Amino acid sequence: MLQSINARTGLAHGAAWAESTSRDIDLAALQARQVARDFAASTTGLRATLLRGIGQRLLFAREALVALADRETGLGLPRLNGELDRTVYQLEQFALALDQGAVHLLLDEPAVAGAAPLGRPRMTRIRVPLGPVAVFAASNFPFAFSVAGGDTASALAAGCPVIVKAHPAHPALSLALAEQVQAAVAQCGLPAAVFQLVQGAGIAVGVTLVQAPAIAAVAFTGSLKAGRALADLAAARPRPIPFFGELGSVNPLIVLPAALASGAAQRAAALAQSITLGAGQFCTSPGVILVPQGEPGDGFVRELAGQLSQMQPHGMLTAGIRQSFESGVQAWCHVRGAQVLAGQAGGSAATPCATLVQVSAADYLAQPALQHEVFGPAALVVRTAALQEMEDVLGAIGGTLTVTLWGIDGDAAQVTDEIQALVRRATDVAGRVLFAGVPTGVAVTAAQQHGGPYPASTAPGTTSVGLAAMDRFLRPVALQDAPDGLIQRLACG
Ligand code: NAP
């Protein structure tokens, strides 16, 4: 049974309701397949109207939705209102991309007369929707990465029916959001199976969904453990399907000597805010901070520890997430060479304690246990003796959503071979490299890349945020010598 729980009191709210059965899920997948061809042939204009309709409904129901989200997540009204705005903006950005009309037509090469290899037929590269997409909602963004979030928006924009597996940490909100999406689908005259919701509080629902033969692709945001298990299931199907998983990220932030020369206190304050934002439950939360040994690095670390000691993060999303945070922090504190700089006191049963632990680069590199994400308001300071050690730490991390580099300015003379090598190493391991600011907060734009080598993503060539998120659900097809009229119908929506 599913039950809405008040995140602040831990008490059940309202009556419990039944989980989706295997039969419900198989039926949902079959119905999605039945409508997939017609939805794939729908005009881009109709899909833009659908996305805008969802956005308008979210805005109209804002007060009730945000209150419900706050009750189930405890994330607070300012954050949740902001997240709802971002979700609506995201829907509007995909609608605008559909308005511009280039979603299905990629390239049209005219025929060239003569013999091969110079001569060739007319080749037109188009993109077609994959089919029904299973979306696993995330716990930590109840609007932006949940029922009506980026995965749903981008799959609907691409012309794929969606079945969302709701996250059990906000089950009543998931139902309320699904009602809004379903109403928008109906208002557009589309069949109900264009968008469906399944719910469960155990792994069976997700497993059944990923294995349903009618599902054509999966989008997932969550833990490495669950994501990897589901990715393996998707690959083990008789007909494997693409699995777009965003699984985990430590988001290293590198403080170069130039960044310590001035404004170090302000930078430390901004970093402390970023580490504790949303109680650290951001996939882009900075988890590893690389600082040069000696002064002024010591001063920066002292300032950061002081700032973090003042922070009082709010409660975490679920008891399970809190427990993993506590065991992750304990593991850090007990490794060889670890110094606990903040976090010895201040946590409570309801709220976690902002924590900062320091190790040397040599200890970090020698102990792979330190290289995993600890999801929550904590960071590991790694003290490095040289730029080469910073590169080595990035290499050990291997795959991350972001790397932040503080202290490289626009002066070409400062971009030495060593700095270039460090930046190249950052691009080797991350989907997004920042040269200013903090990694929390992901802009929804055409250039955005929210992914990276495993475990940041199971599909590093793709992004789950930004307009290119739609590309995940579109498959290229080359049309050879197709007549104009047909190209217009198939590619131009
Ligand atoms: P999760 O445990 O990965 O769960 C995500 C979804 O996968 C839920 O719907 C869950 O359903 C389902 N699931 C879990 N294990 C499964 C399995 N073996 N087979 C099939 N489905 C499975 O994520 P979470 O509950 O949000 O948080 C747990 C941890 O995930 C956190 O402590 C954090 O480390 C990580 N996390 C990372 C990010 C990120 O952006 N990188 C975001 C959120 C969480 P049921 O619960 O119904 O089984």
Image: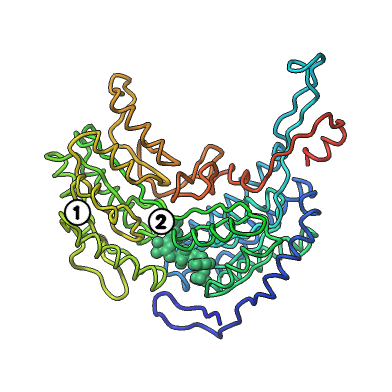
The residue tagged 2 is 282
Residue 26 appears in the figure: yes
Residue 305's disc number: 1
Q: Which of these two is toward me, 349 or 230?
A: 230
- In the rendered image, the quadrant that contains the N terminus is bottom right
Spot the residue most to the left: 295
337 left or right of 60 in image: left
Residue 383's disc number: none
Instruction: Examine the rendered structure and indicate whether residue 478 appears above or below residue 88.
Output: above
Residue 407: image location, x then y, percent: 28, 33
Task: Assign a secondary structure to mark 2.
Answer: loop
| Mark 1 neighbour density, 10 Å: few (under 14) some (14–19) many (20 or more) | many
Instruction: Examine the rendered structure and indicate whether residue 261 appears above or below residue 168.
Output: above
Amino acid type for the residue under numbered disc 2? Phe
Amino acid type for the residue under numbered disc 1? Ala
Q: Name the residue located 71 percent from the left edge and 68 percent from the top edge.
A: 28
Compare marks 1 and 2 and give the one earlier in the sequence. Answer: 2
Q: Is mark 2 within 8 Å of ligand 1?
A: yes
Residue 305: which quarter of the image? Answer: bottom left
